[in-house]
Image (spheres, grey):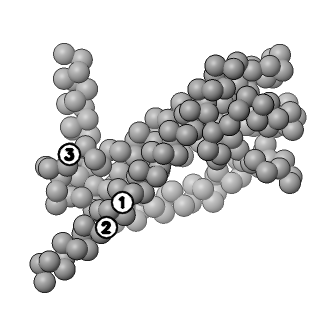
Amino acid sequence: MLQMNGMNILKRTSQFFYEKSNLKTAILCTTIFAAYIALVMSRQAIGFDVANSSVKSLGMTFGFQKSDIISFFQLRTEKMMSAYIGFNLIWDTIFALIYGVMYSVWLSLLLKASAKEISFINLIPFVQVLFDWSENFSLAYLAQQYLSNETISQTIAKLSSVFVMIKWISSGLTYFMIILAIVFLITGRFKKK
């Protein structure tokens, strides 16, 4: 029963994106995405930025070790750590939802003609969102743990690294799907001519 409800929710969500996606919506979502990066993300990241640091945020790397996390935390003051926790729990969580919607709108627009055959493919970007959220919450947990006793959980550190890697793999899959959809759209138009 629960599985059927889950499938129905996925089906309705997928159909919603196919039905509502158009070029205006895609451009609006892209504009919101770019504005959020420029006006919110970049400003919020300043609160934990360390000059000349090679790693600006753990979520921007492709995996890391426990020692990398501790090094990242050691470079930051308590105030910077609080900013990092807030960044992960609030601002980056909102950002993930924004890019998930944007990529799903673009995929839905590009694949609209084949919606019945390919169904849920337009929801692939939300896999990245789920792993981004998992990464955000696990890194915030580790930062809070470090602030409490200057140690972090080896298990949560490994999980965080896995979440980050799956997030980036999902991101690559999303871009691959968008490029593939564009290629199919272009070749389909040439075949019609």
Q: Earlier in the sequence, mark 3 or mark 1?
A: 3
Q: Mark 3 Cα within 10 Å, few/some/many (few <14, many 20+)?
A: some
Indicate which disc residue 119 carries. Answer: 3
Amino acid tagged 1: Ile
Dots 2, 3 in contact, CB < 8 A? no
Location of the N terminus by quadrant is top left
Amino acid tagged 2: Ile
The Cα–Cα distance between marks 1 and 2, rounded to whole angstroms, is 6 Å
The Cα–Cα distance between marks 3 and 1, rounded to whole angstroms, is 15 Å
Is 85 rendered above or below residue 183?
above
Q: Is residue 145 visible?
A: yes
Residue to which mark 1 is pinned: 178
Rendering coords of residue 156 (x, y %): 63, 22
Rendering coords of residue 122 (x, y %): 30, 49
Q: Quadrant of residue 15?
A: top left
Is 146 rendered above or below residue 17?
above
Q: Is residue 97 visible?
A: no
Dots 1, 2 in contact, CB < 8 A? yes
Q: Quadrant of residue 78?
A: top right
Nearer to the camera, 82 or 193: 193
Q: Mark 1 Cα within 10 Å, few/some/many (few <14, many 20+)?
A: many
Amino acid tagged 3: Ser
Q: Residue at x 83, y 16 (%)?
A: 149
Location of the C terminus by quadrant is bottom left
Indicate which disc residue 102 carries. Answer: none
Residue to which mark 2 is pinned: 182
Secondary element type, mark 3: helix
Q: Residue at x 25, y 26 (%)?
A: 6
